[in-house]
Every structure is written in C-alpha cells, then in structure tokens.
C-alpha cells in the first residue's frame, strides 16, 4: 500500500439489535431481560433465541440457544416473537445514516455494516475516532439504539476492533499498533476462523494470532490451500479493504430461504428423512411464493451424529418457487448421501434455496402444457392464507408435524 | 505417404474437419484429424467427436499413398501460418513421424495411429429430403437461436426438421421461445420424415452452405443424418426422443394484433433494453396507434419509447418480455413489416411474417407481480 494511502474502515455493529429495538419501542421492557425469539409462538418452547438483551446475558442466555433451554436459564425473561419487517425497516434507516457519512457502505448483515471513510477523513481532515463518535451519536440520536464501533485499516481489523469494547464502545486500531494488539489474541478471535478451523490450528500448535503469523506461508498454503494464504494475511492484520458497496439498501435484499429441523438423537431411515425434507421444502417454497421470490440453487444441509455437518447443492436450469421442482432436487441430493447415513444418522436436516430473483419469472412453454400444479398450489396457498397453515396439508406429511416440530413432545414434559 | 497440395485449399478443407473434432474428449484420438491419400485421388480429411463427423476433400498430387492422424489444432495452426503455395507432406512409415514442408519452413510432428481413428459412419439413405439451399439456409437462420443450450432436456438441444404434406418445417425451442419456419415443397410426400438435429450440426450445416446454391439432399436412417456438398460431407447423430407437441401451444386467436415496421421495433427495443439491466426484462403495451416499450431498473433509472403501429383488437395492458428473445424473433423476419400479437400478461406473444406467412415465433412472457 502506498504511503498516505491507507484506508480507514469503520465497522458498525448494533448491540443486541432486535432486543434493543423492542426495548426502545416498549419502554416497559427497558432494564429487563428481553429475548427475541425466532418461533411460531412464544408460549411454546419451540424455536431459537434470535437476540438477547444485555440484561439477559448474565443468566447465560445467548442467541442461537433453543427457547426451551433459555426458559430454563431465565424463566422471568420477556420472550417476544421477532418482528422482522420492523427490524429490516430499522436497518434501512440505519443504512441511510451510514450513507450520510460516506457512499461506500457495505451491508454485511441486518445489524452489521462496514463504512469506508477514507475520503471523508482526508477531505475534512477529521480524525477517524471522531468520525466514529459522530456516527455512534447520530445512530443513538436518530434511532435511539446503542452500537459498537471498530476502526481499522481494513474490514477484517475493523470488525475485530469492534469486538473489544461492547456494548457501546469505540475502538480504533492504527496500522502501527496492529502487531501488539493482534498477536496475543487467541486465533478464534480472527474473523473467519470458526470452530473447525480452530481445531485444525490447535493440531499444529497455533493458539494465538501471533503464533499464526509466525507459521511459514508455504506450510499454510500446502495444508489449507487458498484459505491458508488468507489466514497468513489475516494474522498479519492485512485484509481486503474493498467494500462491496453498491446500493446500500439493495444489498439488504433477501439472499436465501431456508428451513431446517433438528432430529433429536439421529435419524437414519431414508423414507422418514425424505418426508421431513418434503415438509421443509413445503415451508421454504411457500415462503418464497409469499415473498414473490424465485430461486435457482437448492442446498441440502445435513448434520450427522458426532457433530459433523456439510452441505450439498445443485443449481437448476431455471428459477422456481414450486415444491414440484425444488423437492425432487433436494431429495436426489439426500439420496446420494444414503450410504453415509447408515453409519452416521442425521441429527439435523435442512434445505435452502438461494440465487434468488424477485417478482419476475420467465414463463416457459411447459407452463402452457400443464399448469395444474400451479393452479393447485395457488388454491392451496389461498386456503392457507385464509384459514391457517395447518388446515390443509399433503397426505405424505400427515404424521410429520407431530413427530418433528423442533423437539419430540414426549421429551418436553419430562425435562 | 508423400503428397503435394495447395496451402489455401488444404487449409479450408482442414478447418471444416477440425470443427468436428473434439477439444475436450477423454479420447485423445478425437482431437486429431485423419488425412488419407489414395493413389490417383484427392486427399481425404476426417474429423469427428463421435456426435458429428466431417469428411472433406482437397485436390493433391499423391506420389505415395498412405494415411495418418495428426493433432488437429496444431495442424490447422501450422498450415494457417504457412505462405501461400505448395505444401509437401511426407511420413516416415516406421516411426509415424510426419514432415510438413513449404518452400522455406519445415515441421516435424508426431502422428497418431490411423487404425485408432473411428471409422467414418455410413448412413443408409432410408429417407431423403431434397431442399433448395437458400430455403434451408432461411430455416436454419430463423430457428437456430431458439435452440436450447440446457443439457437437462436433451430433446430441446436440437432443431426439428419435419416434412408435412406439402411443406417442410424447422422448429426449435429453448422452452422460453419457439420458432417455426415453413417452406413449401413441390411434391406431396406419402411418408413424412422427421429428424431432430443437434445444435452443433445445425451450426456446421450453416457454415457448410455459405457458398452453395441449387438443391441439396439430406439423407437419414434411424440414428444418423448426412448432408453432402461437392467437397464436404457431414454426418450427425440424431437426438433421440419426442419433441414437444408444439402445435397445441400456438394460440389460434389473439386479442391484440400490431402491425409494425420490424427494424424500427428492433432499434427501439435495443435502446430501451439499455435500462433493463437485470434479467433483460422490458414491458410492452399498446394504445390505439403505437406499441410502447418501457424498461426500469431500480436504483438505476428507466427508459421508454413509442413505436408507430397499426393496432387491431383490444388495447393490451402490460406484458413483459426478455428483450433479447424479442429481438431474436424480430430479426428472423425477412420482410419489412411484422405482426406482433398478444392476449394477456401471462399468455404467449406471437411474432409472424405478414406476406409469406412462413414464420412464427412464440415468445413466453415474464410474469411480473
């Protein structure tokens, strides 16, 4: 990088996002443990915690935990159903605020974004820390929400900096301070190093980011391929500074539709798995049709006993929102894994459709030959919209909901 | 083998054969070109990927007959770069080393065993279609673009050539549009032949016919078809399977019909499509005297244009089409004016030729909500 050309990237992360939005909108929840859940009904024990307010964290509740577990840890918490349209709307406002600071905004997820403020900083001779402070105050003033900010020379460092002081902090890492700050941190803190990668790194005796920076590049490359080279760069605090900015609000678009089901201690019966998969595909395609999305890539996700999970994908020649197209593909992907399933029963199965197209479908001449499926699906969707999802179901799915709706009911009553 | 031939005619004969040879087959021999010199005859050049096979001829002075297989791409490149004039090809029989010489340059390349090269297929002429070269060219041009590139539906990866009473039809569809070109035939046939010709063969036949005129024969048996000019013979496998029964798809009646200058509409669609950055989707509607085209891309902008047209029937609301598909259909019309017909936003649109009534292009709309 040329001298004087260092980039200044800000990473903005909303603190306990969904929970904070609910606390803001319902002042009565303020100061109390709020848990926003991803579920059909908060009275039940199904679903997972999508966000926990900071008040709930001392109880040991974390996002991603099942509602059942969370209720055991924090019985007096306020359990709410997530209102995703509200959060999405809120994020759009957030993006607008960010875009008033720079046109280079990359929306990473519903509550995280990167801002390239290099230009802002150079033009107005403003210190990066001050820009970050202005941004944080603006978000608080306009949206009433608390955020954590990290500032660094690239996306990677900015994101890691943001983790230092949460909630409500601002951390600036200057390129010259990089080695001292990064080296002592455990590798797990490196953005992009997950549980699996950590395991691999443990094996070669790498515990801290400093250790990783010492490993010869050739070795990492040989062992991890391209990822190895990336690791080496990342450990030295060198990362990609280019933001996938584009239109901030368009990158907020839905990227995929997915449903998955946990299968308790494991399921090896292929017929039952196919049935569950059919049910999942039904849910996915119905949500796609409701949102007027069509998808092209079908991905099957499996987690097998002993926690080893993987995905298999297939891309269709055209887009679809019909179960008649999506399910056979997902099923074919599942059948290919049958030999593995005999030995390692599946503990989770999921299907998702990505590569989405919104609201436009190129019709095919085959739609003219036989549109009975389309007409049937539309009719069933209309019935469900009017009288509820459970009124009408496929015969093949009759005993499905009873069996696998999160956790088996028989286990729930006797914890 | 020892032969002498002319660089120019050797190159064009080689190129014809090389297009049939395979670049990415697991069988290395298929990337080769076989040349065979008989006593007192022309040099015969063969290329094949087992789907299509080409035999081309090139006049040569054969001093010693023989045959060999050479790497196709390399051979074409060598001959292409040689200066015009005489080329001499000589093989050392034992080592299968081949020497190619022009006046000043000399190449020595390793050949492959000619015995390993697949035999040129033999087509039993069970059926024969005789057609005017110009008419066949028109048929190929009008339908080639509609052939599907998607291997998941093999029957759509070729064009259907079909005799029907006193006419000959070529039909192709990629399931989004369907093109039908009809030419009249003099004689009424008792047995109606129907061939499903793969896209690659369609492409090669087009090239083959460029300098031809008069009548040409297409012969076929159950699996293969053959077409032959004076110097080149092309044999292709036929696609197995049942082509969709397309006739029932073509609406007998439409509610709106617009007679429009073809070139004006093409130019307008091209301009407006600049603003259709996602999916190439443009919206078409009609009022009493024009077709209106609109394209919008959110966050980028929009474009619109009116094209004068003679409208009969009801006013058409909004129907969306893929701009490129629409242009492909219009371009296949050889007359000045075209007929563009619709019924509703999810019903197919039709593009027809007016005078000769020999072309039909059915275009499926994009469903917008």
Image (tube, coloured by chain):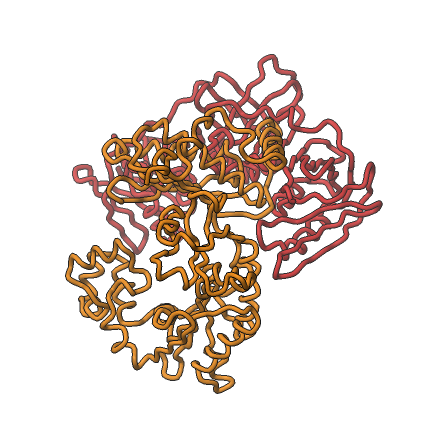
Chain colours: A orange, B red
Expressed as whole percent of the image width and height from the top left, the position of residue A297 reads: 45, 43
Q: Is residue B345 left or right of residue A108?
A: right
Res. B133 visible in picture: no
> Residue B334 falls in which quadrant of the image?
top right
Q: Residue at x 55, y 19 (%)?
A: B193
Q: Quadrant of residue B21?
A: top left
- Up-down: is B56 above or below B163? below
Q: Residue at x 43, y 27 (%)?
A: A399
Q: Residue furthest right?
A: B288
Give me the residue at 47% from left, 55% from top.
A78
Q: Which part of the image, by quadrant, shows the N terminus of chain B?
A: top left
- Quadrant location of the C terminus of chain B? top right
**Residue B18 location in percent, x, y?**
39, 41
Q: Is residue B159 left or right of residue B365?
A: left
**Compared to A239, does A176 lie above or below?**
below
Q: Which residue ends up furthest to the front in the rendered image?
A: A76
Q: Position of residue B153 (x, y in %)?
A: 48, 31
Q: Nearer the viewer, residue B217 or A283?
A: A283
Q: Residue B302: give x, y in percent of width and height.
A: 67, 58
Can residue A389 be seen by looking at this rendering? yes
């Amino acid at each position: 990088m040329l001298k004087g050309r260092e980039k200044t990237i800000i990473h903005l992360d909303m603190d306990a996002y969904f929970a904070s939005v609910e606390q803001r909108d319902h002042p009565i929840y303020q100061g109390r443990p709020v848990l926003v859940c991803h579920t059909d009904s908060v009275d039940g024990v199904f679903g997972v915690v999508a966000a926990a307010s900071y008040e709930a964290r001392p109880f040991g509740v974390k996002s991603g935990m099942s509602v059942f577990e969370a209720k055991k840890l924090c019985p007096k918490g306020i359990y709410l159903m997530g209102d995703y349209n509200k959060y999405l709307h809120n994020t759009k406002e957030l993006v607008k605020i960010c875009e008033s600071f720079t046109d280079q905004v990359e929306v990473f997820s519903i509550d995280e974004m990167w801002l390239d403020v290099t230009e802002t900083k150079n033009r107005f001779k403003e210190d990066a820390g001050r820009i970050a402070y202005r941004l944080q105050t603006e978000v608080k003033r306009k949206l009433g929400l608390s955020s954590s900010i990290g500032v660094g020379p690239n996306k990677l460092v900015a994101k890691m900096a943001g983790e230092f002081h949460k909630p409500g902090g601002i951390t600036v890492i200057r390129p010259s301070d990089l080695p001292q700050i990064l080296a002592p941190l455990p590798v797990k803190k490196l953005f992009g190093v997950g549980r699996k990668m950590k395991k691999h790194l443990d094996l070669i005796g790498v515990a801290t980011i400093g250790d990783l920076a010492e490993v010869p590049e050739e070795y990492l490359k040989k062992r991890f391929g391209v990822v190895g080279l990336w690791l080496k760069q990342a450990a030295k605090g060198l990362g990609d500074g280019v933001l996938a900015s584009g239109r901030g609000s368009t990158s907020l678009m839905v990227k995929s539709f997915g449903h998955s089901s946990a299968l308790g201690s494991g399921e090896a019966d292929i017929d039952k798995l196919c049935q569950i998969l059919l049910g999942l595909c039904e849910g996915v395609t119905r949500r796609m049709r409701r949102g007027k999305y069509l998808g092209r890539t079908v991905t099957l996700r499996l987690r097998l006993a002993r926690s080893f999970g993987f995905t298999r994908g297939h891309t269709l020649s055209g887009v679809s929102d019909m179960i008649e197209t999506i399910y056979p593909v997902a099923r074919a992907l599942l059948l290919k894994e049958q030999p593995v399933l005999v030995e390692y029963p599946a503990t989770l199965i999921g299907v998702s459709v990505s590569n989405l197209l919104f609201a436009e479908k190129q019709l095919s001449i085959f739609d003219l030959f036989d549109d009975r499926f389309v007409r049937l699906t539309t009719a069933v969707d209309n019935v469900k919209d009017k009288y509820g999802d459970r009124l009408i179901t496929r015969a093949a799915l009759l005993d499905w909901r009873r069996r696998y709706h999160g956790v088996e009911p028989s286990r729930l009553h006797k914890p | 083998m020892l032969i002498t031939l002319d660089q120019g005619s050797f190159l064009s004969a080689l190129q014809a054969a090389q297009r049939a040879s395979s670049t990415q087959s697991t069988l290395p021999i298929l990337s080769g070109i076989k040349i065979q010199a008989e006593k007192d005859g022309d040099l015969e050049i063969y290329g094949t990927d087992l789907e299509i096979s080409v035999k081309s001829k090139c006049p040569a002075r054969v001093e010693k007959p023989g045959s060999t297989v050479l790497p196709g791409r390399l051979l074409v490149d060598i001959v292409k770069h040689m200066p015009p004039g005489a080329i001499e090809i000589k093989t050392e029989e034992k080592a299968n080393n081949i020497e190619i010489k022009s006046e000043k340059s000399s190449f020595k390349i390793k050949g492959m065993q000619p015995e390993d090269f697949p035999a040129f297929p033999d087509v039993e002429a069970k059926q024969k279609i005789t057609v005017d070269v110009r008419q066949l060219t028109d048929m190929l041009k009008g339908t080639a673009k509609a052939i599907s590139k998607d291997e998941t539906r093999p029957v759509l990866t070729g064009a259907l050539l079909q005799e029907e009473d006193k006419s000959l039809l070529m039909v192709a569809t990629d399931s989004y549009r369907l093109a039908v070109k009809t030419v009249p035939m003099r004689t009424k046939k008792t047995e109606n032949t129907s061939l499903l010709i793969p896209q690659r063969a369609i492409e090669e036949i087009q090239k083959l016919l460029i300098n031809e005129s008069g009548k040409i024969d297409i012969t076929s048996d159950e699996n293969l078809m053959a077409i032959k000019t004076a110097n080149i013979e092309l044999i292709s496998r036929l696609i197995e399977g049942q082509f969709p029964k397309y006739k029932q798809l073509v609406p007998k009646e439409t509610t709106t019909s617009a007679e429009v200058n073809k070139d004006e509409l093409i130019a307008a669609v091209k301009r407006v499509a600049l603003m259709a950055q996602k999916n190439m989707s443009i919206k078409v509607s009609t009022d009493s005297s024009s077709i209106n085209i609109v394209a919008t891309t959110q966050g980028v902008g929009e474009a619109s244009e009116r094209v004068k047209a003679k409208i009969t029937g009801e006013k058409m609301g909004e129907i969306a089409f893929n701009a490129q598909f629409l242009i492909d259909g219009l371009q296949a019309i050889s007359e000045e004016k075209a007929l563009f017909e619709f019924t509703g936003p999810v019903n197919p649109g039709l593009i027809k030729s007016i005078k000769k009534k020999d072309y039909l292009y059915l275009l499926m709309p994009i469903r917008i909500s």
